[in-house]
Image (tube, rainbow, N blue to C red):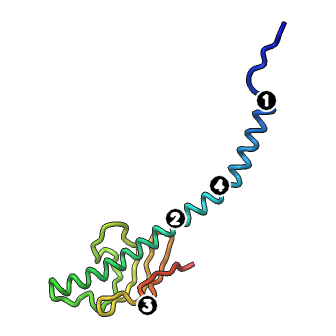
Amino acid sequence: MKLNKKGFTLVELLAVIVILAIIMLIATPSILNIIGDARKGAARSSAMGYINAIEKEAMAREVTEHSDRLMNVTIVDPALIPLRGQAPESVNISISNGTVVSGMLQFGDYVFTVNDDGTVSLVD
């Protein structure tokens, strides 16, 4: 009688599972780092968008309302500036002549400081 051998043995299946587990252990930290970097970049983009919205709102209010309320002020209420997108959870921004000059923004776990030139830096 002839035996018909089709399929894989248990040892072969276990070897494949072990190889896949090793690949997963190597790849998981890299993937998590990529996800973390993407979240950090999204928070930085939100911070830059909020700064841009502040400056636009200051100029718009000066032109339309002839009001300089946002020209030289410190903003501590995130809801003061209307914007599309994610608003910061906390904010402390100083504005001089309608331009953001310094401050701090928090988006989730990320805290950014605003530099003199309007760029943002992540606080570690």
Residue position for label 4: 28
Q: Say few, some or many: other residues with alpha carbon within 10 Å of mark 2 (under 14 / 14 to 19 / 20 or more).
A: few
Q: Decide which of 77, 96 is in the foreground and name it.
A: 96
Tell me which numbered mark, 1 or 2, is placed earlier along the sequence: 1
Measured along the vertical axis of the image, is residue 34 above or below residue 22? below
Q: Residues within 10 Å of mark 4 (few under 14, many from 20)?
A: few
Q: Which residue is mark 3?
A: 116
The image shows residue 66 at horizontal and vertical percentages of: 15, 88
Say which mark, if any, is on residue 38. Answer: 2
Q: Residue furthest top?
A: 1
Secondary element under disc 1, as helix, strand or loop, is: helix
CB-based contact (under 8 Å), mark 1 and mark 4:
no
How many marks overall? Answer: 4
Q: Residue 1 sits in which quadrant?
A: top right
The answer to whether mark 4 and mark 3 are in CB contact below 8 A is: no
Q: Earlier in the sequence, mark 1 or mark 4?
A: 1
- Residue 62 bears which disc, if any? none
How far apart marks 4 and 2 lie (CA) works out to: 15 Å
Label 2 sits on what residue type? Ala
User: Taking 9 as reference, is 64 above or below it?
Assistant: below
Image check: 24 left or right of 59?
A: right
Vertical placement of residue 64 versus 4, above or below: below
Question: Residue 25's spot in the image, x, y percent?
Answer: 70, 52
What's the amino acid at mark 1? Answer: Leu
Provide the residue designation for mark 1.
10
- Counting residues from the start of the chain, the first of labels 4 and 2 encountered is 4
- Bin the neighbour count of mark 1 within 10 Å (Cα to Cα): few under 14, some 14-19, many 20 and up: few
